[in-house]
Image (cartoon, helix red, strand yellow):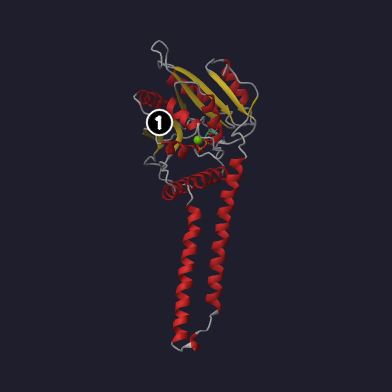
Amino acid sequence: MSPKRKTQVDLVIPIYNEAGVVEQTHVQVRAVVDSLPYDFKFIYVDDGSNDGTVDVLRKIAEGDPRISLLQLSRNFGHQAALTAGLDASRGDLVITMDGDGQHPPAMIPQMIKLIEQGYDIVQAQRIATRDESSISFKKITSNLFYRLINIISGTQVLQGAADFRALSKNALNGLRSMHEYHRFLRGMISWMGYSSVILPYHEPARVGGKSKYSLGKMIRLASDAIFSFSLAPLYIGLSAGLGFFVLAAVQLIYVLTLWLTGHTERIVAGWSSLMGVVLIASGIIMILLGFIGVYVGYIFQEVKRRPIYLITGDKKNGE
Ligand code: UDP
Ligand code: MG
């Protein structure tokens, strides 16, 4: 970094159907960054919106030359959109944040300072407010998910970690070297092991509109995390197999003992216990075949080496 040049900070903001929201978000972010002594660039990634978001983004870009607009050819999902923005970043450091106002721009100055102090990753962590006592489906499933992934995976993922973080050039290059198709960025970033610091925050409500994370998208993200960061489901098979093997050995010893001691009349196979064992064993086998199938599917998609996203349309303002 030359001392004459201002540090370039890229803000990567993925957007999917946020026509009514994105302008306000931009105003909020500008209110914070315009007074800071850095050279800011906004990289808006339109993730295949079909509600006129692109027109709104184009309009904003006309009034602000620091904006580049990347348009993905269809909805590739939040993680792919983030990846597209990160790939386009040329700054000295990059910050990713949501475009719905839920990631407070007021944290940006502190994030930049921490990167300048030498941290590679500044990770924002959503924490519950006291009055946030309402128990939502999303909160429960998200808590369970983080617990599970931290039990079954060697890579620890911070509870409440948001895709709101700052990355140094070093961390960005590390992330760019990871080409996997199924991306769970929170896990990938933790896996890199670079020096990181956590900044807790209370999440404000959306500026407007509804969450774009449908149940299907949440399930996909969770399975991407589980099947790309853990082999535990496969080991369930090994343990279940061993368990059944021990049971079979005990049974064999029992029957042999009865036979050797002349109590053959007591060797009468019970139908229900037999059925029970058969059903449990075949159930476990089916589940495990399913797990193996999922891994094979993931491997299949990885070996195809398809791009994570495709860009369409014009890129505004350089890049
Ligand atoms: N988003 C995206 N692609 C998608 C879903 C969401 O780019 O397929 C964007 C969305 O516009 C927002 C951010 O990702 O800027 C986070 O999504 P959202 O706010 O819907 O998630 P939540 O905050 O409910 O977890
Ligand atoms: Mg949101």
Q: Is residue 253 visible?
A: yes
**Foreground residue, 146 or 209?**
146
- Quarter the N terminus occupies: top left
Left or right: 221 with respect to 115? Answer: right
Tell me which residue sits at (56%, 59%) in the image.
287
Q: Secondary structure at mark 1?
A: strand
Residue 184 vertical position relative to residue 267 in the rendered view, above or below: above
The residue lying at 51 percent from left, 21 percent from top is 42
| Classed neighbour count for the residue bearing mark 1: other residues with Cα under 10 Å, few (<14), some (14–19), many (≥20) | many
Which amino acid, by three-letter code, is at mark 1?
Ile
Res 301 quadrant in image: top right
- In this view, which residue lies farthest toward the left? 117
Residue 151 appears left or right of 225: left
Q: Which residue is mark 1?
A: 121
Position in image of residue 286 (x %, y %): 58, 60
Above or below for 84 versus 290 = above
- Residue drawn at x 62%, y 25% is 54
**Where on the picture, by quarter, is residue 164?**
top left
Residue 192 percent coordinates (x, y)? 43, 36
